[in-house]
Image (tube, rainbow, N blue to C red):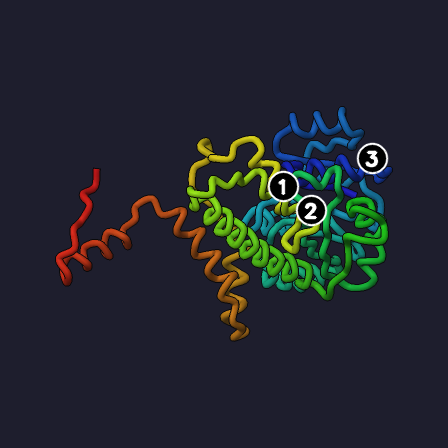
Amino acid sequence: MAMIGLGKMGGNMVRRLCRSGVEVVGFDRTPQVVDDLAREAGMLAATSVTDAVRQLTAPRVVWLMLPSGAPTEDQLHDLIPLLAAGDIVIDGGNSNYHDSQRRGAELAVHGINFMDAGTSGGVWGLDNGYCLMVGGTPAVAETVTPILQALAPAADRGWARVGPVGAGHFTKMIHNGIEYGMMQAMAEGLDLLRGKEAFAIDLAQVTELWRHSSVVRSWLLDLTAEGLKEDTALTTIAPFVADSGEGRWTVVEAIDQGVAAPVLSLALQMRFASQDTQGYSYRLLAMMRNAFGGHAIKKAE
């Protein structure tokens, strides 16, 4: 198979595949990354996407680990003349499931199979394996099963065909929406513990305590506990939380379905609030309170 895009996720996926004996041809726009992986992991280096495809045998499998949007879209279009009927393209990035459905239909016109793979596991996937939620036909899923088994935590778990094309990225989108809510709840609860100064609660101690037999134990809690051991005050981290886009898509989906999702929606809004460096709405609120009630305004420094 070929892996196009050898960043943090793509590179580690190549390493895991090569460890499992899967022959991988890799390409990245940064030649040094390609050279390093070829030397370190035994990956077959490619000088271009065309070169990567030429090194494959039918049915050719090309896995894309590229940023969503234009980079993935452009690469898919460039692949069409390089591939033939029966070949398989897998998008393992965080694409919108609507795009995946459209892309699957476009490739089908040329007889090229498409699979969307929602991929979770982050930087820990190399050692722990990846959770793979894939969408495609049963035949395509069967063809790439050895690849999915090599990437997953074990051959019999951590991966599944969850439905037709689009279902993989849809499932991953909802997964990330849930993740937003879990993170927000944990952050708010720990902030409340920290705020009760009279008790001087040690957050590192409590999060470590919760990891064992508590109802809220989770991998997310494990990571939080480990991070708090290093710096409980988190003074070196700016209070800015980015959103990758999948949280937004999840909330839009809730609106489209008419399904109440207040926790997911508010968690997304809180990320927006953290990104607001101007604070204009808060300035407006202060002005209004002063206007109707004569409440004091704190002057900007």
Q: Which residue is mark 1?
A: 208
Quadrant where the N terminus lies?
top right
- The residue type indicated by label 2 comes to His
Q: Name the element at disc 3.
A: helix
- Tell whether 60 sits left or right of 95: right
- The residue type indicated by label 3 comes to Arg
Q: Name the element at disc 2.
A: loop
Q: Residue at 77%, 52% (x, y): give it.
A: 158
- Depth check, mark 3 against mark 2: the one in front is 2
97 and 198: which one is in front?
198
Mark 3 or 1, nearer chain start: 3
- Tell whether 205 sits left or right of 299: right
Mark 3 or 2, nearer chain start: 3
- Can see residue 49? no
Q: Residue at 33%, 44% (x, y): give it.
A: 277
38 is higher (above) or lower (below) than 97: above
227 is higher (above) or lower (below) than 255: above
Q: Position of residue 182 (x, y in %)?
A: 57, 54
Residue 212 - label:
2
Residue 178 - label:
none
Q: Residues within 10 Å of mark 1 (few under 14, many from 20)?
A: some
Q: Which residue is mark 3?
A: 19
For the residues labelled 2 and 1, the Cα–Cα distance comes to 8 Å
Q: Position of residue 297 (x, y in %)?
A: 17, 49
Q: Position of residue 50 (x, y in %)?
A: 71, 40
- The residue type indicated by label 1 comes to Glu
